[in-house]
Image (spheres, rainbow, N blue to C red):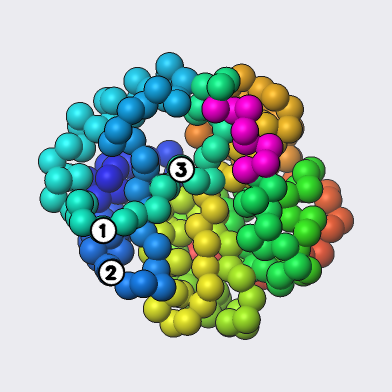
Amino acid sequence: MNIIARNDIGFQSESLSLSEKMKVVLNTRDATLLISIPNIFGSLKSFDIEAEYYWITHREEYYDLYNSYIDSEYLYGDALVFRPYICFNKKERKYVGSYFEQIKSLWYNKEIVIIEGKYTRMGVGNDLFDGAKMIERIICPSSNAYDKYQTILDNALTINKEKLILLSLGPCAKVLGYDMWKLGYHVLDIGHIDSEYEWYLHNVEWKKRMNNNKHYADIVDLENIVECQDVSYNSQILMDISGVN
């Protein structure tokens, strides 16, 4: 709703075009497309105190927009499905280990292409994608990716449709996933799952940078992120369009 309301967020400046496309995505109804919104309209007791306050404020601020664009007769997915750890209370976190295993089964023994920001580096330093049959990556701008949308889309459409596409590219991913879906691709927007997984593995209590070679969710500072020397990661890069003009 931040994007539809044309508010700047983290790594993406407001855009009329992006706002309008997000409205189109939200209003699409097709059995082969799952539209997700955050599961925040009932009790918030499963969240920790900080997240509970955030979502209470969010609901109040965007109440009219939700009323305008959300269809009470439509069964949405949960947009927090790939954020299962850091914002939840300790009781809920007890079950997250088996949940991550279920998530990893989505790409088990599959050829995947990760389309991500320059510093996202999903799976580097952990076993999140170890079960994948093959991993390739398209590296995109670390901020304002939507400003380079056509270039990103054109390159993404060179991918074989038999491969599973995993997106981690902020608001741009929502539109990219939608456009690729329309053309017959199998796409998942997995958002910040990598950060969530690392926080879970290290049993941390709050959002923090675990190492200095990649970006972590909701930590806006990109300074002091070093070049990634991981041989496996660098060998997976299919194309790097992060510096495109």
Element on which disc 2 rests: loop
Image location of residue 64, percent across then percent down: 13, 41
Magenta run includes residue 140: no
Viewer-closest of 72 and 1: 72
Mark 3: amino acid: Leu
- Relative placement, left or right, of 190 versus 10 is right
- Relative placement, left or right, of 63 versus 25 is left
Residue labelled with disc 2? 29
* Residue depth check, mark 1 versus mark 3: number of the one nearer the observer: 1
Q: In this view, does 39 lie above or below 45?
A: below
- Relative placement, left or right, of 139 versus 175 is right
Taking the spot 53% from the left edge, 46% from the top edge, the residue there is 82
Disc 2 crowd, CA 10 A, few/some/many (<14, 14-19, 20+): few
Residue labelled with disc 1? 74
Image location of residue 93, percent across then percent down: 59, 28
Give the main secondary structure of the magenta stretch: helix
Which of the 4 image quarters holds residue 172?
bottom left
Element on which disc 1 rests: loop
Asked if the residue under mark 2 is in contact with the one under mark 1, i.e. CB atoms within 8 Å, the reply is: yes
Residue range in magenta is 92-99
Image location of residue 202, percent across then percent down: 73, 27
